[in-house]
Amino acid sequence: MVLDHFSGKFEVELKYRLKSISQFLAILKSMPHEIMLQDNIESDCYFDTPKQQLLAENKSLCIREMAPSGIKLWIVKGPEADRCEAVNITDVNKAQSMLTTMGYQIVLAMKKTRSIYFVGKFHITVDHLDGVGDFAEFAIMTDDESLLDGYRAELVILANKFGLSEIDLEHRSYRQMYFEICVKNK
């Protein structure tokens, strides 16, 4: 089941800022769902060239380590908004060293608390970022680009069941929000 939810090179994802995480979880509890993991700490290291070439090209390169689940990922997003690919890795330190050898550097390191739930064919992540807030991401991955618009409409309907609407949508990436709120204000 897990592999089905996270396979594909495209990801339709709608991120909503939550006013009340407890209210959101109460609604989730009232509907059929599966729990993949709860309250994992995700440590994300974003890499770029010294001149921020990836950022300029709307690309993102991240090495993620999750605990206590032990999941380790190499994640690339962009340049298209729905383009996202991830692969399991076994050695975070080796992957980071390889990127450094290739001329990349860590441009941002951040942590978040994440829970992942499955509701039908969709996955919902509930995230908390210290100093930034609480969020729910409604998502699905696919290799079929022709399905993206239909999935986006289905995700809006699902989010509405949680009382979320367009005014709750957050269009910035966690990287961008974290940088704007936490790094610039130091």
Image (cartoon, rainbow, N blue to C red):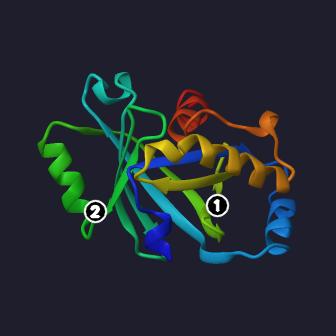
Tell me the residue at 19%/61% (across/down): 94
Circle 1 SS class: strand
Front residue (pair 71, 14): 14
Q: Earlier in the sequence, mark 1 or mark 2?
A: 2
Circle 2 SS class: helix
**Which amino acid, mark 2?**
Val
Distance, label 1 to label 2, CA atoms, is 25 Å
**Which amino acid, mark 1?**
Ile
- Taking the image as shown, residue 99 lies to the left or right of residue 64, namely left
Mark nearer the viewer, 1 or 2 = 1
- Badge 1 crowding class, 10 Å Cα cut-off, few under 14, some 14 to 19, many 20 or more, is many
In the displayed orientation, state which residue is furthest to the left: 101
Where is residue 68 shown, x and y percent of the image?
49, 76
- Taking the image as shown, residue 52 lies to the left or right of residue 101, namely right
Instruction: State the mark number for residue 8.
Output: none
- Badge 2 crowding class, 10 Å Cα cut-off, few under 14, some 14 to 19, many 20 or more, is some
Where is residue 45 shown, x and y percent of the image?
38, 49
Instruction: State the mark number for residue 124.
Output: 1
Front residue (pair 77, 62): 77
Tell me the residue at 64%/60% (across/down): 124
Residue annotated with mark 2: 92
Tell me the residue at 81%/33% (across/down): 167
- Taking the image as shown, residue 69 lies to the left or right of residue 160, namely left
Would you say residue 158 is visible in this rendering? yes
- Taking the image as shown, residue 62 lies to the left or right of residue 4, namely left
Where is residue 31 shown, x and y percent of the image?
81, 73
Tell me the residue at 24%/53% (across/down): 96
